[in-house]
Amino acid sequence: MAEGGFRLPGCSYEELANIIIAYGTRDSAASPGDVGKLNAVHQSSASRTNGFLVEIGVLTGERERLVTRRGRELALALARKDAEGIRRSWRALVSSSEFLQNVVSAVKLREGMLYPTLQAYVAHAAGQPRNKPVMTGAGTVIEILKAAGLLREEAPGQLTATLEEEGEEASGEPGEPAKREPAEVTLEAGAGPSLSIHLHIRCAAEDLDEVVPRLKELLRELRG
């Protein structure tokens, strides 16, 4: 993270997408001025956004900005309007950004947040004042997380974190979510009439810490 706080984007999500497309799909876009000419985006928007793009791994370099492999993949997906490619590319970038992951975690911990509340949280977490440009950038961060499929609007203005697993089953087709097979536990009575009890347990990996103690307690009760 940059000294003085996390650098938020200086434009809307739509403008950010245009800037990324310019950097990632056109070799002549080597400076903010070039980006402005190519995509009708004001040069100052690109300049204010470069820091954010470096923070999340779309660009690299301090003086000469170079697009990264992940940045180019995102740019191509945005240019093609490939929704799945956009989701996958944003997720890959979010996975390497502690700041963006923390925003998703904040929504999970609160079991949902209102859009303006999350905007204010993003600005505060970034160490930035709540002025109009910063709040615009905070809104862009939220839109990125929505495009990544990590946040969704359950109702107008009400954001929740998705429960979708980020991993994909190794043997499945690309893009298919991982399938969870039910775990099975069999208990057999040691004496008296034969009795078998089958427990089918379905849970996400992050829920195991809570499920396992309850399961052990249940097994102790069944065994007497």
Image (spheres, helix red, strand yellow):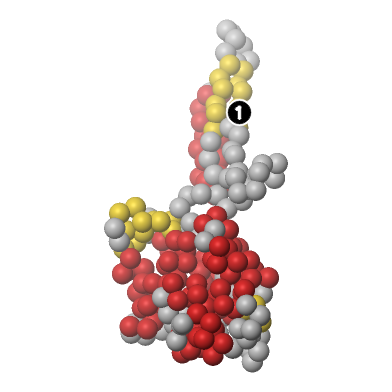
Whether residue 126 is visible: no
159 to the left or right of 194: left
**What residue is shown with label 1?**
184
Image location of residue 39, percent across then percent down:
50, 80
Q: Is residue 99 left or right of residue 125?
A: right
Residue 199 drawn at (x, y percent): 55, 26
Depth check: give the residue in front, 18 or 48.
18
The answer to which quarter of the image holds residue 106 is bottom left
Question: Looking at the picture, how far across and down is residue 25, in whole percent?
Answer: 62, 73
Q: Residue at x 41, y 61 (%)?
A: 107
- Of 209 and 191, the residue lying toward us: 209
Q: At numbered mark 1, what does the secondary structure look like: helix, strand or loop?
A: strand
Q: Amino acid at mark 1?
A: Glu
Q: Is residue 149 left or right of residue 174?
A: left
57 lies above or below 221: below
Q: Quadrant of residue 59?
A: bottom right
Q: Which residue is drawn at the image coordinates 55% and 62% (left, top)?
A: 80
Q: Position of residue 52 (x, y in %)?
A: 53, 80
